[in-house]
Amino acid sequence: MPELSLPDTIAMLRRTPVTLNALLRDLPDTWTLGNEGAGTWSAFDVVGHLIHGERTNWMPRVKLILEFGDARPFESFDRSGHEQAIAGKSLPELLDVFARARMDNLDALSALNLHPADLNRRGRHSVFGVVTLSQLLATWAAHDLTHLHQISRVMANQYRAAVGPWSAYLGVLQCDGHSS
Amino acid sequence: MPELSLPDTIAMLRRTPVTLNALLRDLPDTWTLGNEGAGTWSAFDVVGHLIHGERTNWMPRVKLILEFGDARPFESFDRSGHEQAIAGKSLPELLDVFARARMDNLDALSALNLHPADLNRRGRHSVFGVVTLSQLLATWAAHDLTHLHQISRVMANQYRAAVGPWSAYLGVLQCDGHSS
């Protein structure tokens, strides 16, 4: 079992709202509302998805592990749940909501006062079976990165034609969307 | 020829230094110095590469197009040129150097007072042949995004083992490194 550094994980989780704020707030719509075609997500949609995860996925699962261990499986995560989060909202509003939700969740995580041994506590994923609290927390951080990866790809896609022959040299334009 | 919005392009170019600053400054070394194996780049290395591009690639090519058109090919870009930029530097220093270099370059770009028709001016790439100023500027912005894409992938790689079975669901961990 790889040992997880809780401080390193929390340090990463703290960066995502400020990073997305620096990248996206008040950026022209070309960048923030463009997607990769019908049924795909824009940067705006991704921020909504991150909000939905803060509300229904990460901390609820942490609490389920601490309370019920692997006796009760996690609720499944609704990948279209962001639609409710984004309805009628502007991007600056979503960025604010995400930042607040993340801060509240990190405060709640800190209040649990987890000890290293707690990281080995077991939960139950409906597909994977037994997982650990450590794996859940690592996934929370890596999930942020998968969506930063996606946002950079979706944004680059808006300039796919504009770069002309340079598209051959831009790796992000070769990415096949495995991170959506 | 797709029409490029110069303001949209500049808006994106302005975001990269603040985004990388928000993501990386004072983040634990696990995230900033980890790479994807021997001969690959860490987030730290990527910032060095971006500095090198500011110094030797983008604005020098813009100026070459305006001065010589397609009569003189661009200098080739040295992909190991960042080694000199990073030697003996800390990450906060590199972030400062990048932010300053980018700001100076955007000031210089603005001082050129480009008109829409200028975007069609032609330059010569040693491999692609004739390219336009528009394509060069679009590539400058998309190149930032290719490296944000890379940084998020390299960082996620540090938690490849820690996420356990969730690696199957994290697209960034399926990315084959086309963006390095």
Image (cartoon, coloured by chain):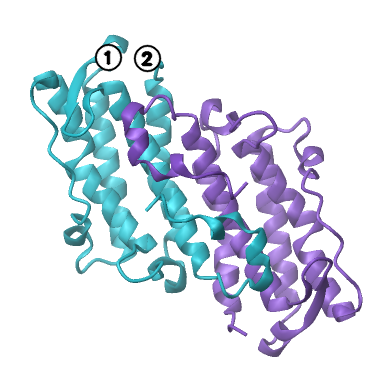
Chain colours: A cyan, B purple
Among the two numbered marks 2 and 1 on one chain, the one whose residue lies closer to the N terminus? 2
On the image, the x and y values in percent for residue A167 come to 63, 65
Circle 2 — which element?
loop
* Residue located beneath label 2 in the image: A1
On the image, the x and y values in percent for residue A155 come to 48, 63
User: Quick check: B130 above or below B104?
Assistant: below
Q: Residue at x 69, y 53 (%)?
A: B100
Q: Is residue A25 left or right of residue A61?
A: right
* Residue located beneath label 1 in the image: A120
Spatial separation of the CA atoms under disc 2 and disc 1: 9 Å
Amino acid type of disc 2?
Met
Protein chain holding label 1: A
Q: Is residue B159 left or right of residue B59?
A: left
Q: Residue at x 77, y 65 (%)?
A: B59
Please report contact status of discs 2 and 1: CB closer than 8 Å, yes or no: yes
Protein chain holding label 2: A
